[in-house]
Image (cartoon, rainbow, N blue to C red):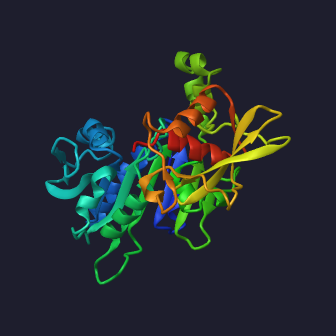
Amino acid sequence: MNKFYTGKQVLSYGTPFIFSLGNRSIGKTFYWTCRNINKFLHEGKKFIYMRRYDEDLKRVAPSYFDAVAFKFPDVEFEVKGNGKSGTEFYINKRLAGMTVALSVATKYKSISMPDYDTIMYDEFLPEDNVYLPNEVGNALNFYQTVARGGGQAIREEVKFIFIANNVTLNNPYFRDLKIRDNIMLGTKYSVDPDKAWVVELTNNAEIAKEIATTPFGKMIAKTKYGDYALKSEFYLDDATFIQKPKGNSRYYCTLVWNGKSYGVYEYFEEGLFYVSPKVDPNSKDVFALSTLDHKPNYIMMYRNTFNPLYHFLKYAYDNALLRFETDDCKFMFMEFMSYQT
């Protein structure tokens, strides 16, 4: 039995969106690359290899076929381009696919792609937790660009494969698409009732055990990175600073991020500030954290020396004076702090 990853089961659910998360070095990218090649060889279907930025593509796309070439000894592979968006993949001298960075995907909006049926978004969960502004909207927009055509508004056979290590469940995709609330932790597969998405959480204990017996594995065994690499724990998900408040409080302000409002409270007895999902609808101190959320009577918060609230919240967090009632509140705040305005 092959100890490495296979996506056959997750494909059986028939959903257009597939989120494949798992521990490192189990063969996720390897499997989906082989599938792209086989789909082209047997069905003539092309694929798109996606990363967040062109610089990411430039590092990896030129060697896209290298790791899997031994599986196809009679097939000729070629990459034409420097890896950035528009680089072309050739299989047996025929165009089989291309690269697209999500950051520039809107440039392809008017292009017809009826012979493409797979978008492979590799490492869609960044370990630095920094995403594009409106990242999910950009991804959905690009999917519609690829999936339209052929006499159909949406070609349901088009797959959007999201691949990542176990970085975090608190990400923009799982939040905006209401996936986070529907994931059944402890089970390998969670499926959308409307069959739009499936989430696969793979913990390959055999590969982790093999790594653990190496000098490297022994070195990282008792580190946070070791929990991530060997125990399949989510790298950025922990309960630090998440707790329920106690005592009396006063309402400080409202923060609006990605269409959702959060309240900031000061708790006197604890000497702490809390970010809460509960808001005071009568508060006039409402801060939009990005231009996308800005509305009349909101105060735009920019990351600069002219905004004392931003620096106050950062000071409170840096000095361990800030707490979060839920993991969603913490995720919002961490995402906001890394947001590039």
Q: Residue at x 17, y 58 (%)?
A: 95
In the image, is 214 to the left or to the right of 88?
Answer: right
Which sits in the foreground, 314 or 104?
314
> Taking 278 as reference, is 4 left or right?
left
Question: Residue 247's spot in the image, x, y percent?
Answer: 86, 41
Task: Give the vertical position of 292 relative to 222 (above or below).
Answer: below
Residue 199 or residue 139, whichever sits in front: 139
Q: Quadrant of the C terminus?
A: top left
What residue occupies the far right of the structure in this picture?
Answer: 247
Front one among 300 and 214: 300
The N terminus is located in which quarter? top right
Q: Is residue 309 above or below residue 45?
A: above
| Residue 4 appears in the rendering | no
Q: Residue 132: x and y, percent?
A: 40, 48
Q: Is residue 314 left or right of residue 162?
A: right
Residue sticking out furthest to the bottom: 151
Q: Quadrant of residue 191?
A: bottom right
Residue at left offset 48%, top offset 58% = 293
Q: Residue at x 41, y 74 (%)?
A: 156
At x 55% / y 26%, what residue is drawn? Answer: 211
For the question of whether residue 281 can be seen, the reply is yes
x then y, percent, for residue 42: 29, 64
Q: On the picture, is 47 further left or further right than 225?
A: left
How many numbered tags mark residues here?
A: 0
Q: Position of residue 218 (x, y in %)?
A: 60, 17
The residue lying toward the viewer, choosing from 104 and 157, is: 104
